[in-house]
Image (cartoon, rainbow, N blue to C red):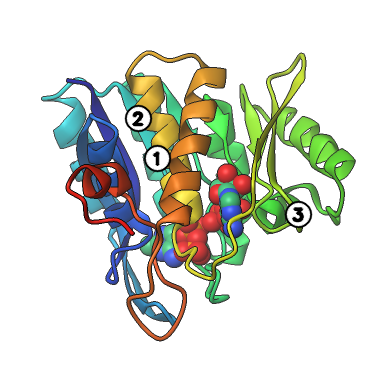
Amino acid sequence: MKHVLTVAGSDSCGGAGIQADLKTFSALGTYGMSVITAVTAQNTTGVVMVREMDPEMVAAQINCIFEDIKVHAVKVGMVSSAEIITTIGNCLARHRAVNIVIDPVMVSKSRCNLLRPEACETLVKVLFPLATVVTPNIPEAEVIVGGTITTLEDMKGAAVEIYNKGAKNVIVKGGHMEGPAIDVLYDGKQFLQFSGERVATTNTHGTGCTFSSAIAAYLARGLTMTEAIEGAKKYIHRAIAHSFPIGRGVGPTNHFHELYEKAGLLD
Ligand SMILES: Nc1ncnc2c1ncn2[C@@H]1O[C@H](COP(=O)(O)OP(=O)(O)O)[C@@H](O)[C@H]1O
Ligand SMILES: Cc1ncc(COP(=O)(O)OP(=O)(O)O)c(N)n1
């Protein structure tokens, strides 16, 4: 059994954040552990409140895990403030964490800030050099590189710029573009494209959290970066294809589609 840690925020409605990460780790045959950076009160229509954890408590959670359990991969999601980011960076470096997937979560689809805008620079400076892979969506990549991304060539340019900020691999996700869902990986030498048919649904809450957690789970299981992204892409595609409405807004993806299929619970 491989052990995967998520360092992220709690999503009360269960489709994104810590909850999505733990479901993904379990669905992909790994043991999931969590460090909570913030608690959000949110549902399918939006985020109504955010409470950050004390950085000391974030450090205590990380240290407790690393001092006792082998961690085969780490996914980092919502990190909220510069103080929390610095704490996470120090702890991951001290424990020599491996297979670090940084999802630079900034704003939810419902347009709530999940990262204080002034903390973006710290996120890039402190966490990107520790990252095995960084997984920005288009709006996040635009903030990081300070430009507009509208084409595949723009995505490639952004991936190179983000790589130059210290990450070993960068995958710019194309979920926010039109047409097929194409993600672009840059590993410092070449570009690879991962393409999936776009699923026509509004139930895409937590797609980015789920995708980055799937990459972490597959890296923990010993797959190469390319294999891990291919696996994650297939997993998120099926999770979106079998997503469902649970409230009045953007519903979650179906993390356990394979299990439900075997149980005869899918349409
Ligand atoms: N409607 C969709 N159909 C198929 N794949 C999608 C769809 N929306 C997003 N994806 C894929 O889901 C993953 C997460 O991307 P994205 O939604 O852009 O992340 P985020 O939630 O961070 O905004 C990517 O692999 C992207 O290509
Ligand atoms: C607690 C928490 N973390 C992250 C997100 C954002 O999730 P993401 O997968 O990037 O996409 P949306 O949920 O915005 O669709 C979140 N909402 N909550």
Q: Secondary structure at mark 3?
A: loop
- Mark 1 Cα shell of 10 Å, populated few (<14), some (14-19), many (≥20): many
Q: Secondary structure at mark 2?
A: helix
How far apart are labels 3 and 1 at the CA level? 24 Å
> Which residue is depicted at the point 27% across and 71% down?
12
Query: Which residue matches tag 2?
Result: 217
* Mark number displayed over residue 203: none
> Which residue is depicted at the point 79% across and 35% down?
161
Pick the front one: 199 or 186: 199
The earlier-in-sequence mark between 3 and 2 is 3
Q: Position of residue 215 (x, y in %)?
A: 45, 32
> Which residue is depicted at the point 52% across and 24% down?
132
Q: Position of residue 241 (x, y in %)?
A: 47, 54
Query: Which residue matches tag 1?
Result: 213
Tell me the kind of residue under disc 1: Ser
Pick the front one: 30 or 99: 30
Tell me the kind of residue under disc 2: Ala
Of all residues shown, which one is farthest toward the left? 68
Q: Please give left or right for residue 159 compared with residue 132 in the image.
A: right
Pick the front one: 68 or 200: 200
How far apart are labels 3 and 2 at the CA level? 28 Å
Query: Which residue matches tag 3?
Result: 179
Q: Secondary structure at mark 1?
A: helix
Q: Is residue 122 visible?
A: no
Give the label, 3 or 2, closer to the camera.
Answer: 3
Q: Please give left or right for residue 21 compared with residue 161 in the image.
A: left
